[in-house]
Image (cartoon, grey):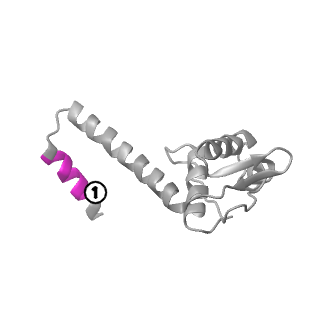
Amino acid sequence: MHIILNNSSMVPIYEQLMEQIKNGILTGKLSANEALPSVRTLSSELKISALTVKKAYDCLEEEGFVITVHGKGTFVAPTDRQLALEARKKAVEDDFFNAIQKARAVGMSNEEIREIVNIMLED
């Protein structure tokens, strides 16, 4: 598993780790029932706290992407890829909703919001 973390990012390390593992699962790079590295091993490889890896694994388990078997490790959960993709799309929709609410709170019109989105899509 190839993980790249950006220490200068505003995104917390555990969230970066979660997103990369989720992407691996959704793209098929990580298959159902495949064992993930142990918390200790991954924290050592990435030179981050074991608590950070544990938090990422716990969040992934809450979201149904992995299963932890006490004494055996953490494994990719057998998932319906379409269902997982829909969950990620819903999260994006929620982020857009929150951004629109923020924009409206500062008095931006729908046209100004669309203009910002169009500019961002051009990049």
Question: Which residue does the image show at 50% across and 56% down from the upper left?
Answer: 83
Q: Is residue 97 left or right of residue 28?
A: left
Q: How many labels, in total?
A: 1
Position of residue 32 relative to residue 54, above or below, is below
Q: Position of residue 112 (x, y in %)?
A: 15, 46
- Residue 122 versus residue 91: which sits nearer the camera? 91
Quadrant into which the N terminus falls = bottom right
Quarter of the figure with the C terminus: bottom left
Magenta span covers which residues? Answer: 111-119
Q: Is residue 117 magenta?
A: yes
- Which residue matches tag 1? 120
**Rendered location of residue 117, percent (x, y):** 24, 53
Predominant SS along the magenta part: helix
Q: Position of residue 72 (x, y in %)?
A: 84, 51
Between 78 and 70, the one lying in front of the other is 78
Instruction: Report whether 108 appears left or right of 99.
Output: left
The residue at the point 51 percent across, 45 percent down is 11
Q: Kindly indicate the quadrant of the structure image that contains residue 12.
A: top right
- Residue drawn at the location 55% of the way across and 67% of the way down: 27
